[in-house]
Image: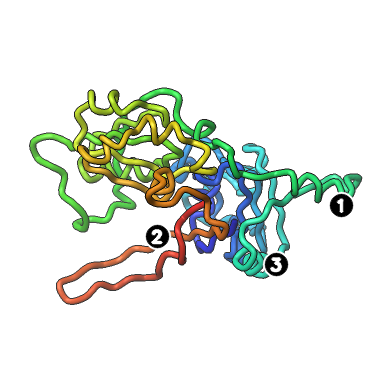
């Protein structure tokens, strides 16, 4: 798939939603701000490959702790540069997401690589069980003051925090930080957690996270979650999860693209938006 973000390549690479996929970055240069521990959206890089037009030979950012190339080498992520990523993006946009192979071994024939690519698919694969947490945990860290939105947003409750149970289908740390910033005590649970276990926690709301792979391959997420939760508890969701329920979208869209959500400033007179989200859902 392709991603049109002009920034945030580290967040993209460590987003569990990209597990089992290669990402084509349309931004003309990647790697110029390096990488750092604070920008990790999870504990590791999940994507299988990075395709870029130009890998920056220099890093210039006060927060940088390593180069992108060093990060990819440490994480075992293969990358390829000097690719016309916008031409590739047009092909993906018109024909839909396609399997591919990145190979550094010149002895492997083109025919063998084509056979390998044609034999790969995400259809019917449960990637959620790969990326989901195996143990329940509570998240408390809010957004760092350097990146907080100041007076904009919801004020935390004064008497007690909101209790939110978050299903981890491939959740990102920044989602958890934002929930904490708005006064939520978030309990993150594995993807196969039962509805009964959620009810026992007496949450004020249930959050269904983003995630990778084919929604039709994870029927247990629907069975465990239960339609009674949909009816009785306020529900928050993030992109992937409507596809878990057949009444919404029981399949993976062929054309998969994503971008960054851009900030908006609301005032009494107008709402000014700097950019927009790419057309279509942030699906994989």
Q: Is residue 270 above or below residue 163?
A: below
Where residue 161 appears, as percent x and y from the top left, is 17, 36
Where residue 99 appears, x then y in whole percent?
69, 51
Of callouts 1 and 3, which one flags the residue occurring earlier in the amino acid sequence? 3
Residue 261 - label: 2
Residue 153, located in which quarter of the rendered image? Answer: bottom left
Distance from Cα at disc 1 to Cα at disc 2: 39 Å
Which residue position is annotated with label 3?
Answer: 84
Q: Quadrant of residue 274?
A: bottom left
Q: Which structural element holds mark 3? A: loop
Q: Residues within 10 Å of mark 3 (few under 14, many from 20)?
A: some
Label for residue 208? none
Crowd rating for badge 2 (residues with CA inside 10 Å; few <14, some 14–19, many 20+): few
Q: CA distance from mark 3 to mark 2?
A: 25 Å
**Discs 1/2, front:** 1
- Give how far apart the Cα atoms at labels 1 and 3 are: 20 Å
Q: Residue at x 81, y 47 (%)?
A: 115
């Amino acid at each position: 798939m392709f991603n049109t973000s002009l920034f945030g390549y580290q967040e993209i690479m460590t987003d569990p939603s990209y597990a089992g996929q290669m990402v084509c970055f349309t931004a003309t240069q990647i790697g110029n701000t390096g990488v750092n521990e604070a920008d990790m959206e999870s504990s590791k890089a999940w994507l299988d490959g990075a395709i870029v037009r130009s890998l920056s030979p220099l890093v210039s950012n006060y927060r940088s702790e390593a180069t992108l190339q060093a990060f990819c080498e440490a994480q075992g992520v293969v990358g390829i540069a000097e690719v016309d990523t916008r031409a590739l993006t047009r092909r993906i946009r018109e024909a839909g997401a396609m399997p591919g192979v990145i190979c550094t071994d010149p002895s492997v024939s083109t025919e063998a690589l084509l056979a390998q690519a044609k034999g790969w698919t995400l259809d019917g694969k449960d990637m959620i069980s790969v990326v989901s947490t195996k143990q329940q945990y509570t998240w408390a860290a809010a957004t760092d003051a350097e990146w907080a939105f100041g007076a904009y947003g919801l004020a935390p409750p004064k008497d007690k925090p909101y209790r939110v149970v978050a299903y981890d289908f491939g959740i990102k740390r920044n989602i958890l930080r934002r929930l904490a910033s708005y006064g939520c005590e978030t309990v993150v649970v594995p993807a196969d957690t039962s509805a009964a276990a959620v009810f026992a926690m007496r949450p004020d709301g249930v959050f269904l996270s983003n995630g990778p792979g084919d929604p039709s391959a994870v029927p247990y997420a629907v069975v465990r979650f239960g339609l009674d939760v949909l009816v009785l508890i306020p529900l928050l969701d993030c992109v992937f999860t409507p596809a878990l329920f057949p009444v919404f979208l029981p399949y993976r869209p062929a054309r998969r693209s994503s971008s960054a959500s851009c900030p908006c400033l609301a005032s009494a007179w107008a709402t000014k938006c700097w950019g927009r989200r790419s057309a279509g859902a942030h699906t994989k």
